[in-house]
Image (spheres, rainbow, N blue to C red):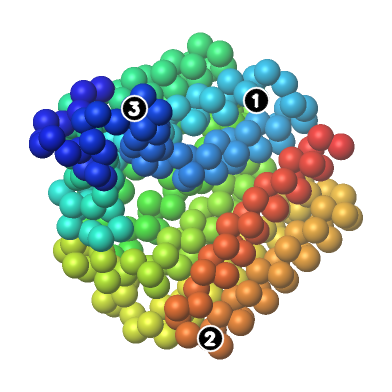
Amino acid sequence: MPLKEQSRVAPGGACPGAGPEDHRHKWSRAFADLTKIRITVLSTLSAATGYVIYSRRIETGMVTCAAGVLLAAMGACALNQCQDRDLDARMNRTRNRPIPAGILSLRAALAVSAILIISGIVLLWTRHNPEAALAASGAIAWYNLLYTYLKRVWAFAVVPGAAIGALPPLIGWTAAGGGLLDPRIVALAFFIFMWQVPHFWLLLFQHGADYQQAGLPSVTAVFSTRQLMRVTSVWMLATVASSMLLPLFLLANSRWAVLGLAIAGLWLLGHSFRFLRRPPESFLPVFRALNIYVLLIMALLAAEALL
């Protein structure tokens, strides 16, 4: 992947004479930023959860499924940065991403994206089944075609966009041999769909002005700060409610699993209620709690399937 030609001093202050370790660190950092590795890991975990819930065991297939989803998700994120390079250049939090910062050329980023997407889809198709590969392809199309366009024209694009995060557990379930429309996995996908919306809106308390500066429609221009805090808290309440529906779909049958769901839900609601009584700048603890909450629920469901 060639460096974009600019000047004798590379972006970030790296000199032409920098050693091999510096170059490796620079490229690994650029790759992680381009593929949004921290975000794609969560999609991978939810896919693995879907696989384990259906198969009720940990096996090689879970690893290949997770790897396929990880590769496809990383490729989709890289493609999104190619599509959004003009917006990224206008926002403070994204202007140092590899493409707008000049670390990677558009052609190199597109090549990385294509390799990752094709590798992920092929892995899911050959090691699992066409249904899993098609579900992953559908998630990529939803993200890179529909959502990427909608967020430029509609402040509430995150609501249909949240379906993207709901698809990885469906991919894992299907890769293990389950039916795509089985009510059990649809219930889990719906829970993750509900979680995605407050997850994104909480970030707007820090980055909302950045979105508006870039010319993107944002709910921060629709709601006042206090209104957005209340709306986000209602979505968190709905997320907890959707998790308590999981036992009705036989995803949490034991008493200890139902108790775990209830305790985790009450813990998150406590964070939500405290958030309403504090300044909006205090969003970070509830944002972390929301992320921990979804990991707890997935771990709980996977544990029950394995025991």
Under mark 2, the amino acid is Arg
Give how far across and how far down residue 260 sits, in percent.
80, 58
Q: In the picture shown, does residue 243 fall above or below 227? A: above
Residue 19: numbered disc: 3
Give how far across and how far down residue 5 sits, in percent.
11, 31
Q: Which residue is mark 1?
A: 62
Q: In the picture shown, does residue 287 fall above or below 282? A: above
Under mark 1, the amino acid is Met
Indicate the secondary structure of the residue bearing disc 1.
helix
User: Relative to the observer, which residue lies in front, 135 or 124?
Assistant: 124
Tell me if residue 183 can be seen: no
User: Does residue 149 appear to the left or right of 77 in the view shown?
Assistant: left
Residue drawn at point x = 70 percent, y = 32 percent: 52
User: Alpha-carbon distance for marks 2 and 1?
Assistant: 42 Å
Q: In the picture shown, does residue 42 fall above or below 23? A: below
Quadrant of the image containing the N terminus = top left
Give how far across and how far down residue 219 sits, in percent.
32, 71
Residue drawn at point x = 87 percent, y = 54 percent: 256
Under mark 3, the amino acid is Gly
Residue drawn at point x = 55 percent, y = 36 percent: 44
Indicate the secondary structure of the residue bearing disc 2.
loop
Which is nearer the N-term, disc 1 or disc 3?
3
User: Does residue 292 appear to the left or right of 117 in the view shown?
Assistant: right
Residue drawn at point x = 83 percent, y = 48 percent: 253
* Label 2 vs label 3, nearer the camera: 3
